[in-house]
Image: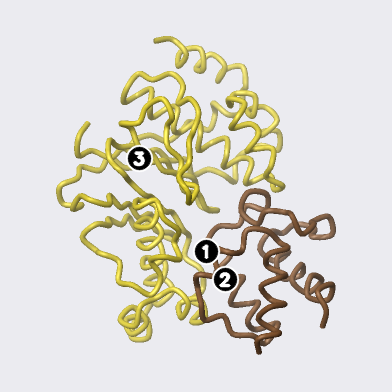
Chain colours: A brown, B yellow
Amino acid sequence: MDKSDIARDLAAIVENYTEFDMGIIDPSTSLREELGLTSFDIIALLTEIEEVFSISIDDIDLLADIGTFGEAIDLVADLRVAE
Amino acid sequence: MTGVVSIYSFSHREALCEHFVERNVGRLPEFRRKRCHRYRRERDKQACIISYLLLRQGLFEQYRIAEPGEFIFNGYGKPYLKDYPHIFFNFSHCERGIVCAIAEFEIGIDMQEIHPYDPGVAKLVCSADELCRLTESADPARLFCRIWTAKESYAKARGIGVAEVFKQETPEGLVRHREEEDAFIALCCERKKMDDIQIQWPKTCLNLSSFRNGGRQQKNDEKYSKK
């Protein structure tokens, strides 16, 4: 699974939270300041990411690292490599 | 004003007309308009506008301050009033509504509607003791919402990221909850015991009708601009 596959699947997850067409979102899009996701939304997003991508997010400090859609893609890619 | 927190709220989001943003964004100062325009979703733009108007209303009622002025932010994005360093405020919003708390000390407020309980989310957020309480609770969804809002309000009062208070017990004495039918509002004053704090909540709800007629609200704006 390469980053474009991750981006596609991640977009589908984020769509559920934003009710927004992710087709026009790019990696620089801010999850909080543009898509309006709250900390609660991002936590819920992380748990769904765990399930969809079969990864384990144990370090909750990662929450602070996810500011943009691109950073979320990178997080998933890094965790998939680690596992 | 020492020892007093005033909370302003708006909870009729479903009744906002489709032209609300268009009709009211012009009432914001430029820095706030820019922030509003960054949001992609209409409801986030609405929250951005309403939260600012609540703050403006509160500052006028409490201090006769006509305009909040620019915000400055700490490293975690917590906003402060550049021109009034002795006045503190905090916003929160959810589908249920929007709230603004104002005081003369550091405060944090969080509003969250109750979601179906997700053990996976709780595992990331809660301390061992909190997880135990959730497991034993007859209504874990409600309890988790209470725990979450306590953590969020505590982190916001301290001006830090909420992740920094995950998996720790939140000092209950510093947090006061207001339980609605389907939501919680939590207020935290970082360095003061809540028993010593007088909370006025919610002090005022913005009148929805003032948003329906831009002309009528313009008249109110003129009142606020007079010192």
Question: Which mark is nearer the camera, 3 or 2?
Answer: 2
Q: Position of residue B99 (x, y in %)?
A: 44, 44
Residue at horizontal 59 percent and vertical 32 percent from the top: B32
Question: Do the numbered discs 1 and 2 sit on residues whose CB atoms are within 8 Å?
Answer: yes
Few, some or many residues within 10 Å of mark 2 (<14, 14–19, 20+): some
Residue highlighted by disc 2: A44
Chain of the residue displaying label 2:
A
Could you say where residue B165 lies in the image, as x and y percent from the top left?
A: 38, 66
Q: Which of the two discs, 3 and 1, sits closer to the camera?
A: 1
Alpha carbon of mark 3 to alpha carbon of mark 2: how far?
28 Å
| Above or below B155: residue A59 | below
* Residue at x 72%, y 77% (from the top left corner): A77
Q: Residue B130 sits in which quadrant?
A: bottom left
Measure the alpha-carbon separation of dots 1 and 2.
Answer: 6 Å
Tell me the chain of label 3.
B
What is the number of callouts on the image? 3
Which label is found at residue A40?
1
Residue A77: image tag: none
The residue indicated by pointer 3 is B7
Side of B50 where B45 appears, left or right: right
| Residue pictured at 41% horizontal, 43% vertical | B90
- Name the kind of residue labelled 1 in the image: Phe
Asked which secondary structure carries label 1, the reply is helix
Label 1 crowd (10 A; few <14 / some 14-19 / many >=20): some
Work out which quarter of the rendered image holds the N terminus of chain A and state it.
bottom right
Q: Is residue A29 left or right of residue B192?
A: right
Distance in Å between CA atoms under marks 3 and 1: 22 Å
Depicted A41 relative to depicted B8: above or below? below
Q: In the rendered image of this protein, does residue A28 appear above or below residue B79? A: below
Instruction: Tell me the kind of residue under disc 2.
Output: Ala
Figure quadrant of residue B66: top left
